[in-house]
Amino acid sequence: MKLSQRAREIQESPIRKLSATANSAKARGVNVYHLNIGQPDIPTPEAFFEGIRRYAEPVLAYGPSDGLPELRRTMVNYFARFGITLTPDQVIITTGGSEAVAFAVNAVTDPGDEVIIPEPFYTNYNGYSSLSGVRIVPVTTAAESGYHLPDPAQIESLITPKTRAVMICSPNNPTGTVFTEKEIRSLGDLVKKHDLFLIADEVYKEFTYEGTRHFSILELDDLEDRVIVLDSISKRYSACGARIGAVMCRNPEIMGAIMKFAQARLCPPTLEQVGAIAAYGLPKDYFDSIRKEYQDRRDILVETLTSNPDVLLHKPEGAFYVMATLPVDDSDTFARWMLESFDQNHETVMMAPGAGFYSTAGKGKNEVRLAYVLESPKLRRACEILLEGVRQYNNKS
């Protein structure tokens, strides 16, 4: 007997692969600051839980495969606040944003096809592509340019007869970059010229800083047949465990295909949808204080880490992540060493090694992704421990 090729080749998540090592550190009495995963500590809004408590059906039955009608209507109303017009049949609820990615990729590609994605990118795109038999074609971006897109001609040069889509994430995980309207429009022109799809992971759309505006691909004119947006309440309402996401598209053929995928997995979770309906009823200014909190945390992380001039990073414009270049020989080895062999006053830091956020071999070897999802005093302390870890790692025999 042998495992399938996809089972052998699928990437181990750099975000979670050191979890057992972190648990061993905790068992030794070491407090681990988790900067590896985008798990916000902002409280889930009480409205979410209150909505679930009001659920009064005598049986928790299967729901519709495309999601509860009230949730789809509520999301349509929510996006109208941003000037984006949708109808309920242009929204399909998924089991988390992860399923939304898988549904979208599978709807527009066949095994052996290619999807162009700027790197570094959300590491699980590697996993979804492996399961679908799709090849990621990376467009490398750099901290020196703020991880913004290169000249459109460079992206166009990567298009082959096997290319089916361009996929982006903005605000970006893992870089915090927010692509400009000009960048998004240039991609729109490119996919229209080459008859491709444009897929956008926009789950961090509320989290932009210092007046930076998120421009959605749903705002592109004359591209209704080829733009697909992936969404989630995980970060929007600090409800990662609820596993409620969505696919939004104005192309009925695409939505019909995704509906068949949705039927194959039966339905998304009902109670969490009920909670999401209530959360979407919160006023638009709900995010003002949360946005300020994340911006303050970002500033603490950038200020503390860059006190070491050998730590290089781009100040994020959105989301709550940063890719940091550390003065270490190998971030994978360093991240493991921090959990196995280092602590300061019985405290250490867990981070996500950078190589797993790239498709190009050799990239990200001395980078880490850090999530600033801890309250400010803990975040500052975690950054100080990280810097001391770098010092001791480089001085060890």
Image (tube, rainbow, N blue to C red):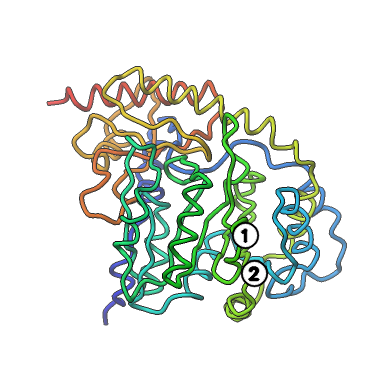
The residue that appears at 41% across and 60% down in the rendered structure is: 125
Q: Which mark is residue 115?
A: none
Q: Are marks 2 and 1 in contact (CB under 8 Å)?
A: no
Looking at the picture, does residue 129 appear above or below residue 333?
Answer: below
Q: Total marks drawn? A: 2
SS class, disc 2: loop
Find residue 98 and report its horizontal and vertical position in percent.
52, 61
Q: Which residue is mark 2?
A: 250
Q: Left or right: where does residue 280 sit relative to residue 140?
A: right
Q: Residue at x 45, y 25 (%)?
A: 301
Q: Is residue 44 above or below residue 51?
A: above
| Quarter of image, res 353 | top left
Q: Quadrant of the C terminus?
A: top left
Q: Residue 250: which quarter of the image?
A: bottom right
Residue 180's x, y, as percent? Answer: 50, 44
Between 101 and 164, which is closer to the camera in this rendering?
A: 164
Q: Amino acid at mark 2?
A: Arg
The N terminus: image quadrant? bottom left
Percent coordinates x, y for residue 142 in the rendering: 32, 41
Q: CA distance from mark 2 to mark 1?
A: 17 Å
Q: Tell me the crowding category of disc 1: few under 14, some 14 to 19, or many 20 or more residues within 10 angstroms, Cα based.
A: many
Classify 301 as above or below 330: above
- Give the structural element (helix, strand or loop) at label 1: strand
Residue type of the residue flagged with mark 1: Gly
> Residue 343's quadrant in the figure?
top left
- Pick the front one: 207 or 271: 207
The residue carrying pointer 2 sits among few (fewer than 14), some (14 to 19) or many (20 or more) residues within 10 Å by Cα, namely: many
In this view, the mark in front (2 or 1)? 2
Q: Earlier in the sequence, mark 2 or mark 1?
A: 1
Q: Which residue is mark 1?
A: 245
Residue 341 at x, y percent in the picture: 27, 32
Residue at image coords 48%, 75%: 108
